Image: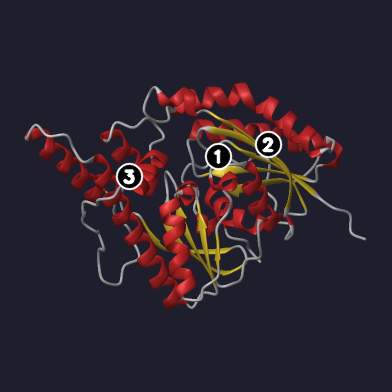
Amino acid sequence: MTRPYHLLAIETSCDETSAAVVRNGREVLSNIVSSQIDTHRRFGGVVPEIASRKHVESITVILEEAVTKAGISLDDVDAVAVTQGPGLVGALLVGVVAAKSLALALDVPLIGTHHIAGHIYANRLIGEIEYPALALVVSGGHTELVLLEREGKFRIVGRTRDDAVGEAYDKVARALSFPYPGGPHVDRLAQSAEQEIELPRAWLEADSYDFSFSGLKSAVLAEINRWKMKGEEPAYAALAKGFQASVIDVVTTKAMRAAAEFGVRQMLLCGGVAANKGLRSRLSELCAKADLPLLIPPLSLCSDNAAMIAAAADLKWRRGEFTPLDMQAEPQLSLERWSVAT
């Protein structure tokens, strides 16, 4: 019988400090996440320097808790995985230094891992991925359509040209006077609204799978200003519903069109905005209608976490594709370049 292997993973790309232990690439033994939301809320968004300092304060405690909760010792760790990029460079460096130190002390391989690959392969922690597959990545910093022609092989077929979905939600939320992070507040308000203010859709070129949300954000701000100039209270709920309807219509329509063009066997929804109820519901409806299997991680695996980093690192662990100890944090790390070699 093959001995089980354990990957100890670290995620510090933005404002969550997380460590996890995953057995055999699939079984999550622990997944500890320390959020900094309360710290950054007063500033209306993530402050990079503060995020880095908080990671320094938390990383050792989070690592110890992850190992203890997993019921293993450090001697049982077979490799250390860490988010190499993309992300905030100072935040990434905290995780990278911790991972290098552990890998060196334990004399085990180091696996630098791509953050978005982690979001995509979080789906593998809940089910099998059938290839070719299409991943709709929606997060605070990324909105992409990623074609997975085979396991660990990524090709970006569409991306945002300006704001990511999560950024657009947060900017609209601020205009609606919601605190950071604003996405969940906008989602709840949209779900409760009876009326909808129709807003524009940015379809771009006829054959494009790219996205643009800056114009939609501007349209929301223009509506609010129009009401205020007349001395009227803006219809915030109807506006939130219209904004969300526009976002969901564009991203799901393009995702389904790409799925048909590339003949994929499965759709994957991933990233922090995958927690959005409206998006989850609409994409589920469209995939069911098209008889296309859909995987969506549970809410605990949508936001940034280390278990997803372990799931992606497992791709390279099984192929023996390890990272040298002189690895650098790469804020602009390419997903396609990070693809497995074999």
Residue sticking out furthest to the left = 230
Amino acid type at mark 1: Ala
Circle nearer the N terminus (2, 1): 2
Q: Residue visible at 49% across and 53% down?
A: 334
Q: Residue visible at 39% across and 43% down?
A: 188
Q: Which mark is residue 99?
A: 2
- Image vertical order of residue 85 relative to residue 260, above or below: above
Q: Which residue is mark 1?
A: 329
Q: Which mark is residue 168?
A: 3
Q: Secondary structure at mark 1?
A: loop
Q: Residue visible at 45% across and 72% down?
A: 259
Q: Residue visible at 18% across and 38% down?
A: 234
Nearer the camera: disc 2 or disc 1: 2
Residue sticking out furthest to the right = 1
Amino acid type at mark 2: Ala
Nearer the camera: disc 3 or disc 2: 3
Q: CA distance from mark 3 to mark 1?
A: 27 Å
Q: Secondary structure at mark 2?
A: helix
**What is the basis of the colouring in this image?**
secondary structure
Circle nearer the N terminus (3, 2): 2
Circle nearer the N terminus (3, 1): 3
Quadrant of the snapshot with the N terminus: bottom right
Nearer the camera: disc 3 or disc 1: 3
Q: CA distance from mark 2 to mark 1?
A: 11 Å
